[in-house]
Image (cartoon, helix red, strand yellow):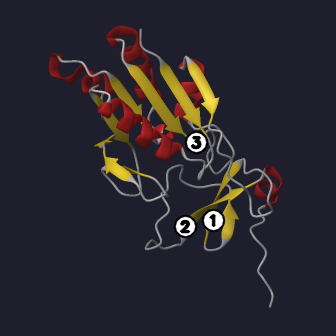
Amino acid sequence: MGVLRFSFGTMGSGKSTLALQIHHNLTHGGLRGALCSMLDREGARVSSRLGVSADAVVIDPSVNLVEIAANDGEPLDYLVCDEAQFYTPEQIEQLAHVVDTLRLDVFAFGLLTDFRGRLFPATARLLELADHAEAIQCEARCWCGERATHNARVVDGEQVYEGELMVVDDPTRAPDVSYELRCRKHWTAGEGRPDIVL
């Protein structure tokens, strides 16, 4: 019987690194699987801020994950799904279907909440359907030293709480959009790291 596991954390908590490690271990153990991602900063890859990456199947809302797992009649042994918060709720249901009917193991990794502090729709569905949901143990920190709990979207130097749900940070884009880790207090207040005065 397969298992649907959802591992979640803030940016910088090691989600993609863990996804790459699991995919590596299972592949080298002789299993056949697919590494999948949506909106990764490197396109058709899963990439970690530590500098490691691997080719991946690009997921968009039109992709049927049951078809990927079924693999033209030769079902895979597992799926590793990075950036799962960006999948559609229907695709999360497809992952549960894959586990229950094809008996694959599915390892999903993603953020819990968006820049507004609300659950992503896919994350909510993963929490409802996953056999196991667990926080990644590598804690990221806010600029103040407290545990980071939120991902703040910063546009032209100011934190925003409204806007398009899926915007990937891109330094070549105007306006300048980036993301920062913050504790709940500094996320709520919209306070970034104070300027250092020399």
x%, y% of residue 91?
40, 28
Q: CA distance from mark 2 to mark 1?
A: 6 Å
Quadrant position of the C terminus in the picture: bottom right
Q: Closer to the N terminus: mark 1 or mark 3?
A: 3
As helix, strand or loop, the secondary structure at mark 3 comes to: loop
Front one among 178 and 12: 12
Query: Which residue corresponds to the image point at 41% horizontal and 42% vertical from the top-left?
Result: 20
Splitting the image into 4 quarters, where does residue 92 fall?
Answer: top left
Which label sits in the foreground, 1 or 3? 3
x%, y% of residue 174?
48, 73
x%, y% of residue 54?
33, 48
> As drawn, is 160 to the left or to the right of 75?
right
Task: Report the residue marked by disc 1.
Answer: 154
- The correct choice, above or below, for 50 with respect to 103 in the image is below
Query: Which residue corresponds to the image point at 36% horizontal and 12% vertical from the top-left?
Result: 103
Note whether residue 76 is visible. Answer: yes
Task: Report the residue marked by disc 2.
Answer: 177
Task: Report the residue marked by disc 3.
Answer: 111
> As drawn, is 192 to the left or to the right of 91?
right
The answer to whether the residues at label 2 and label 1 have Cβ atoms under 8 Å apart is yes
Splitting the image into 4 quarters, where does residue 80 fall?
Answer: top left
